[in-house]
Image (cartoon, grey):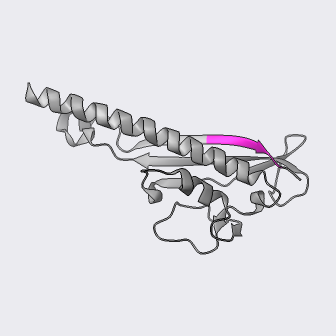
Amino acid sequence: MLPILVALTLGVVDGARIFAAQISLANGVREAAIFGGSPTGAKAWCPAALPNPYIVCPGSSLTGQSGQTMADRIVGEAHGLTLPGITLATPVCTNSAGVAVTCTDVTATTVKVSATYRMSLHLTALPVIGAIWPNPVVMTSSTTAAILR
């Protein structure tokens, strides 16, 4: 009886952690997209000097001042998340025809921001559950915002 109670308790705790992490990730990506839609935001993906620990930024990042980037917006909403577990994908900008353009292009009208989060679960510490439940759980969130000029 006790092992079943422990498994149920860990399952409820992990379920709540997954739910809260997805909300934090979605809020961060939404904030990053809103910032990316500002006149200078689409040109500032990650800080030039990454603090440690920090989220994983795209390899060819457009950089900006610390505190004034899309990545900083995600970090600001990452309550309770392990920052190195978050990966910011390269933002995608499109023009009015829906064609992908560089985010520094003056014809860019929208910016799409995406990020993933890898989260380890407590429940998978139990041998039977660990064999059938994916660990880590991978969550993805993305949103698109208009670029204001």
Query: 138 or 13: nearer the eye?
Result: 13
- Horizontal side, residue 30 vs residue 19: left or right: right
Please tell me how many numbered marks the rendered image carries. Answer: 0
Height in image: 73 above or below 21? below
- Would residue 51 be visible to someone looking at this image? yes
Image quarter in which the N terminus is found: top left
Residue at (40, 47) in percent of width and height: 119
- Horizontal side, residue 149 vs residue 137: left or right: right
Q: Position of residue 41 (x, y in %)?
A: 75, 58
Residue at (30, 31) in percent of width and height: 12
Farthest top residue in view: 1
Q: Is residue 119 magenta?
A: no
- Horizontal side, residue 29 vs residue 145: left or right: left
- Would residue 132 be visible to someone looking at this image? no
Q: Is the magenta stretch mostly helix, strand or loop?
A: strand
Query: 141 or 12: nearer the eye?
Result: 12
Q: Where is residue 142 in the image (x, y as percent from the top left)?
A: 63, 41
Farthest left residue in view: 1
Height in image: 33 above or below 39? above
Span of residues in magenta: 142-147
Residue at (24, 35) in percent of width and height: 10
Q: Position of residue 93 (x, y in %)?
A: 78, 50
Q: In which quarter of the image is residue 5?
A: top left
Residue at (46, 50) in percent of width and height: 79
Q: Position of residue 132 (x, y in %)?
A: 29, 32
